[in-house]
Amino acid sequence: QVQLVESGGGLVQTGGSLRLSCAASGGTFSSYAMGWFRQAPGKEREFVAAISRSDGNIYYADYADSVKGRFAISRDNAKNTVYLQMNGLKPEDTAVYYCARRRGTYYSSTRDPYDYDYWGQGTQVTVSS
C-alpha cells in the first residue's frame, strides 16, 4: 500500500521560508511523477508544482505562475522523498499543502489533480502579514 506523509509546515511571517517534505512508502518511488497541491479555506484544491520521474538524472519541473521563481520542487529517489522549498512566502500562500503521486508510470507530471491517485494527509502552511 502506498503512503505519502508530508511534514515541514508551520507558521511563518511574510517573506519567510519553509521546506516541505513528502516521504513515500510502498511502490517504486522513482517510477512516478510527483506533485504538490494546496487548498485554502473555501477554495478548490490547486496545483502548485510537480516534478517528472527521472530520465537518467534529468527531471522536468513545472510550477504554477503564482509560485514561479519563489518555490522549488526536488526529489531524492534514494530517500523516497519529494521536497518543496518555499521562499518569499506571502499571506496568499496560506493553505493546506498536499503531495500526490501521478497515476501511472508516465514520465511527465500534470497539473490536473485527477491525474494523481495517492495523496498525503496534508500539512498546514500559515503566512502571517
Image: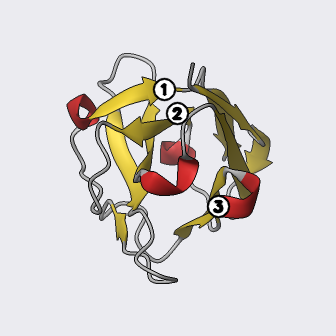
N-terminal label among 1 and 2: 2
Q: Secondary structure at mark 3?
A: helix
**Contact, CB < 8 Å: mark 3 with mark 1?**
no
Residue ID for mark 3: 77
Indicate whether 31 appears above or below 102.
below
**Contact, CB < 8 Å: mark 1 with mark 2?**
yes
Q: Could you say where residue 43 lies in the image, as x and y percent from the top left?
A: 32, 23
User: What's the amino acid at mark 1?
Assistant: Trp
Q: Secondary structure at mark 1?
A: strand
Q: Secondary structure at mark 2?
A: strand
* Structural distance between the alpha carbons of marks 2 and 3: 19 Å
Left-right relation of 102 to 114: right
* Structural distance between the alpha carbons of marks 1 and 2: 7 Å
User: What's the amino acid at mark 3?
Assistant: Asn
Question: Can you tell which quarter of the image residue 53 is in?
Answer: bottom left
Q: Can residue 17 be seen in the rendering of this structure?
A: no
Q: What residue is rendered at 32% in x and 59% in y?
A: 64
Residue ID for mark 1: 119
Indicate whether 49 appears above or below 29.
below
The mark closer to the camera, 3 or 1, is: 3
Q: What residue is rendered at 29% in x and 25% in y?
A: 44
**Dot 3: within a 10 Å radius of its alpha carbon, few (fewer than 14), some, or many (20 or more) residues?**
some
User: What's the amino acid at mark 2?
Assistant: Tyr
Residue nearer the viewer, 21 or 78? 78
Residue nearer the viewer, 8 or 65? 8
Q: Could you say where residue 103 lies in the image, as x and y percent from the top left?
A: 30, 36
N-terminal label among 2 and 3: 3
Q: Can residue 44 be seen in the rendering of this structure?
A: yes
Q: Tag on residue 59?
A: none
Q: Could you say where residue 42 lies in the image, as x and y percent from the top left?
A: 36, 16
